[in-house]
């Protein structure tokens, strides 16, 4: 299974390295930056599964980064845990109201932060349970490569399977064609961007063959998402 990607935006380089070590040891893929503006660039180019965001960052304050992340389609639903030495109630409320999913006050132990981060991931990404992914009547058994919708088997080609799995691991999140190329086909691929549209159409046709609602949402000028809600 693809590793869960964590973005750590922390200007204390020693702390960032310590957290990176603990999260990688726990099986996560980790990217780090001490700069708020760079954090926005990284998150936009390769949306992480979770962001650990320090309040005080170089270039752009973490609270402002959080506000912008919530406006970006790529990260609107990405769980964010704020890290800060500000322990006052007003600061905690401000962080949560800005869009953070949790708030951890320094000093903290890396093991505690790891546990808190995993709790947020379980809460925000309920579709990911062990080796079985599920969303809106769709189930995917990752171990056996079996997909079902409403109990009926869905037969997918290898590319459509990888595409659906990526969507099911990030339900509701909008991905651009370029991001899907990177995640599903690989960064070194020479496949044209429009190829994504072809496979999206195939995936839609197969998933909807039984007459169910279209779960693949097209977001104009942004990309695609697995979303049962209205466009």
Image: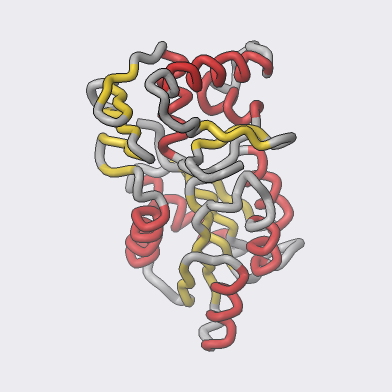
* Position of residue 44 in the picture relative to residue 199 (left or right): right
Residue plotted at (33% across, 43% down): 128
Residue plotted at (55% across, 36% down): 225
Q: Nearer the viewer, residue 17 or 171?
A: 171
Residue 103, image x, y percentages: 48, 72
Snapshot quadrant of residue 58: bottom right
User: In the figure, 149 relative to 135: above or below?
Assistant: above
Residue 171, image x, y percentages: 46, 42
User: In the figure, 202 relative to 229: above or below?
Assistant: above
Q: Nearer the viewer, residue 1 or 217?
A: 217
Q: Nearer the viewer, residue 180 or 137?
A: 137
Residue plotted at (63% across, 14% down): 195
Residue 157, image x, y percentages: 41, 11
User: In the figure, 101 relative to 179: above or below?
Assistant: below
Snapshot quadrant of residue 85: bottom right
Residue 142, image x, y percentages: 29, 28
Quadrant of the snapshot with the C terminus: top right
Q: Which color scheme is applied?
A: secondary structure
Quadrant of the snapshot with the N terminus: top left
Count of labels shown? 0
* Position of residue 51 in the picture relative to residue 221 (left or right): left
Residue plotted at (44% across, 23% down): 208
Judged from this view, the residue extending furthest toward the front is 211
């Amino acid at each position: 299974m693809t590793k869960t990607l964590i973005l750590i935006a922390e200007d204390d380089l020693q702390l960032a390295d310590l957290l990176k070590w603990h999260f990688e040891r726990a099986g996560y893929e980790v990217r780090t930056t001490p700069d708020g503006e760079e954090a926005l660039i990284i998150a936009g180019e390769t949306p992480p599964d979770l962001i650990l965001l320090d309040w005080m960052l170089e270039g752009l304050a973490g609270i402002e980064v959080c506000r912008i992340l919530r406006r970006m389609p790529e990260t609107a639903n990405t769980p964010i845990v704020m890290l800060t030495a500000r322990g006052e109630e007003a600061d905690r409320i401000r962080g949560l109201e800005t869009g953070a999913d949790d708030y951890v006050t320094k000093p903290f132990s890396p093991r505690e932060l790891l546990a808190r981060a995993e709790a947020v991931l379980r809460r925000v990404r309920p579709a990911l349970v062990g080796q079985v992914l599920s969303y809106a009547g769709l189930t995917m058994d990752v171990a056996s490569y079996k997909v079902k919708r409403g109990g009926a088997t869905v037969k997918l080609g290898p590319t459509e399977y990888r595409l659906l799995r990526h969507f099911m691991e990030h339900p509701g999140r909008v991905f651009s064609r370029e991001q899907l190329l990177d995640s599903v086909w690989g960064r070194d691929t020479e496949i044209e961007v429009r190829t994504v549209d072809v496979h999206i159409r195939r995936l839609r046709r197969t998933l909807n063959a039984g007459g169910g609602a279209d779960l693949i949402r097209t977001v104009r000028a942004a990309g695609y998402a697995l979303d049962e809600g209205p466009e």
